[in-house]
Image: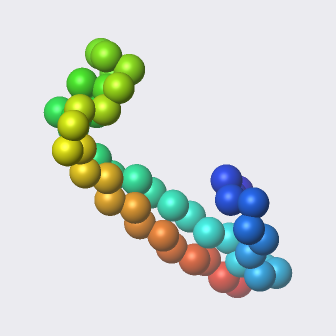
Amino acid sequence: MSYSAKPTPAGQSIFDNVFVNPSAYQSFLTSGTWPDKSVFILEKRVAAS
Protein backbone atom coordinates (compact mmCIF):
# COMPACT_ATOMS: atom_id res chain seq x y z
CA MET A 1 0.00 0.00 0.00
CA SER A 2 1.35 3.40 -0.90
CA TYR A 3 -0.08 6.90 -0.57
CA SER A 4 2.44 8.22 -3.05
CA ALA A 5 1.70 8.86 -6.72
CA LYS A 6 5.30 7.88 -7.41
CA PRO A 7 5.51 4.24 -8.59
CA THR A 8 7.73 1.77 -6.72
CA PRO A 9 9.99 -0.76 -8.43
CA ALA A 10 8.35 -4.12 -9.17
CA GLY A 11 8.25 -6.45 -6.18
CA GLN A 12 8.83 -3.72 -3.59
CA SER A 13 6.56 -2.11 -1.04
CA ILE A 14 7.28 1.09 0.86
CA PHE A 15 6.22 1.45 4.48
CA ASP A 16 6.07 4.85 6.19
CA ASN A 17 5.66 5.62 9.87
CA VAL A 18 5.15 9.09 11.28
CA PHE A 19 6.12 9.76 14.89
CA VAL A 20 4.98 12.79 16.88
CA ASN A 21 5.10 13.81 20.54
CA PRO A 22 2.05 12.33 22.34
CA SER A 23 1.10 15.68 23.90
CA ALA A 24 1.11 17.34 20.46
CA TYR A 25 -1.12 14.55 19.15
CA GLN A 26 -3.55 14.96 22.05
CA SER A 27 -3.68 18.69 21.33
CA PHE A 28 -4.41 17.91 17.67
CA LEU A 29 -7.25 15.56 18.63
CA THR A 30 -8.77 18.24 20.86
CA SER A 31 -8.38 21.29 18.63
CA GLY A 32 -8.03 19.86 15.10
CA THR A 33 -4.79 21.79 14.57
CA TRP A 34 -1.20 20.96 15.39
CA PRO A 35 0.46 23.12 18.05
CA ASP A 36 3.21 25.52 16.95
CA LYS A 37 6.67 23.92 16.78
CA SER A 38 5.31 20.37 16.53
CA VAL A 39 8.00 17.96 15.32
CA PHE A 40 7.20 15.06 13.01
CA ILE A 41 9.64 12.21 12.38
CA LEU A 42 9.09 10.30 9.12
CA GLU A 43 10.50 6.78 8.88
CA LYS A 44 10.70 5.31 5.38
CA ARG A 45 11.42 1.62 4.94
CA VAL A 46 11.50 -0.50 1.83
CA ALA A 47 10.58 -4.19 1.79
CA ALA A 48 11.58 -6.42 -1.06
CA SER A 49 11.09 -10.09 -1.74
Left or right: 40 in relation to 42: left
In this view, the residue farthest toward the front is: 36
Residue nearest the viewer, comparing 23 with 36: 36
36 to 45, vertically: above or below = above
Q: Quadrant of the N terminus?
A: bottom right
Image spot of residue 32 (x, y percent): 38, 20
1 to 7, vertically: above or below = above
38 to 6, vertically: above or below = above
Asked whether residue 44 is in view, the answer is: yes
Q: Quadrant of the C terminus?
A: bottom right
User: Residue at point 28% right, 47% down?
Assistant: 20
Residue nearest the viewer, comparing 21 with 37: 37
Colouring of the image: rainbow
User: Residue at point 57% right, 77% down?
Assistant: 46
In this view, the residue farthest toward the top is: 30
User: Residue at point 17% right, 33% down?
Assistant: 23
Quarter of the image holding residue 34? top left
Left or right: 15 in relation to 29: right
